[in-house]
Amino acid sequence: MENTKPIPGIDYPRTFDEMDDWFRTEAGCRDYIRRLRWPDGFLCRHCGVIEEPWIMKRGVFRCRACDSELSLTAGTVFQDTRKPLRTWFLAMWFITSQKNGVSALGLQRVLGLGSYETAWTWMHKLRRAMVRPGRDLLTGEIEIDETYVGGTEEGKRGREIEKKSIVVVAAEKNGRGIGRVRLKHIKDVSAKSLLGFIRETVEPSATIHTDGWRGYSGLPAAGYKHRVTNISSGDEQAHEAMPRVHNVASLLKRWLLGTLQGGVQQQHLNYYLDEFTFRFNRRRSKARGLLFHRLAQQAVAIDPAPYSSIVYGKSVLRG
């Protein structure tokens, strides 16, 4: 029989049955959240003392040193939830166990949630937890280019767009394959926007491979090695000169169409890109329970996102 005990230092359920058993009760869910938040013992955010707290009747922790109180879920994705934590854990397992992602409607159906709005909000809250704070920068040689989301625009070519959203894509070279990726929705293809993205995502001194767009001309001055392929004057097509970044862009569009049926709210696009990145960078992982664990870790490490902060516009891109 396979050993399903937690691996020391990597504490996660490895099968659905194990997950279902671990988190069958609210007490089990609360214990897991506590261990994720304070692996070295409860840390009071007011006085900084690490000490076993008093546990109040309503499930609030009271610091023995300064008497300040803290809810277990305060300052996490789960803050102010009215649903059982078990339902949240089931949602995280379902989201991470589906290779190509899920829609809010699919989440509503599998969890039996009473409203589509709840499922949609949960999806967006969890997408915000898919980016690890302080994640490592890309290294080595990286292909970078832009792609466009939102369908076609008649009479517009190349970087001449009006309504579509611009997504800049960075893909590490890993031999003949693709390593890690980063994606971001940017407002334009100016040097300021492009170099800002690159500084956020790529290690200084890395080699960056781009086309001849002038927005990338400042890379050497910014401390990067710059390899340029002038697509318009060469024999190679863009997808031949930089196959990795174009492959990622193609997969992104296919994923948006398949998971979201082509409807993307522009103000939420970066969070969809975060989900795509989370899935792509872990595409070879066979330990689905570990993906669940990583999402749960990040869900307790980021600030809460109230519904009002998620919904702030109705602009929708199609295509």
Image: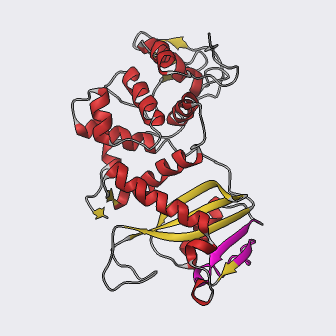
Which residue lies most toward the left here? Answer: 114
What residue lies at 62% left-to-right and 61% top-to-bottom?
A: 171
Residue 6's place in the image compared with 237, above or below, is above
Residue 305 shows up from this direction:
no
Q: Along the line of sight, which residue is nearer the eye, 147 or 195?
A: 147
Residue 63's place in the image compared with 306, above or below, is above
Q: Position of residue 67 (x, y in %)?
A: 53, 18
Q: Position of residue 42 (x, y in %)?
A: 61, 21
Which residue lies most toward the front here? Answer: 235
Residue 6's place in the image compared with 77, above or below, is above
Quadrant of the image occupied by residue 225: bottom right
Q: Position of residue 296 (x, y in %)?
A: 52, 31
Instruction: Assign the C terminus to one quadrant of the image.
Output: bottom left
Count the marks: 0
What residue lies at 42% left-to-right and 53% top-to-bottom?
A: 255
Q: Along the line of sight, which residue is nearer the eye, 190 or 47?
A: 190
Residue 287's place in the image compared with 221, above or below, is above
Which residue lies most toward the bottom here? Answer: 233
Q: Position of residue 80 (x, y in %)?
A: 36, 30
What residue lies at 51% left-to-right and 77% top-to-bottom?
A: 189
Q: Specify whether residue 213 is painted magenta.
A: yes
Quadrant of the image occupied by residue 81: top left
Residue 127 shows up from this direction:
yes
**Residue segment shown in magenta:** 206-227
Q: Give the colour scheme shown.
A: secondary structure
Q: Along the line of sight, which residue is nearer the eye, 119 or 18?
A: 18
Q: Specify whether residue 218 is painted magenta.
A: yes
Quadrant of the image occupied by residue 194: bottom right
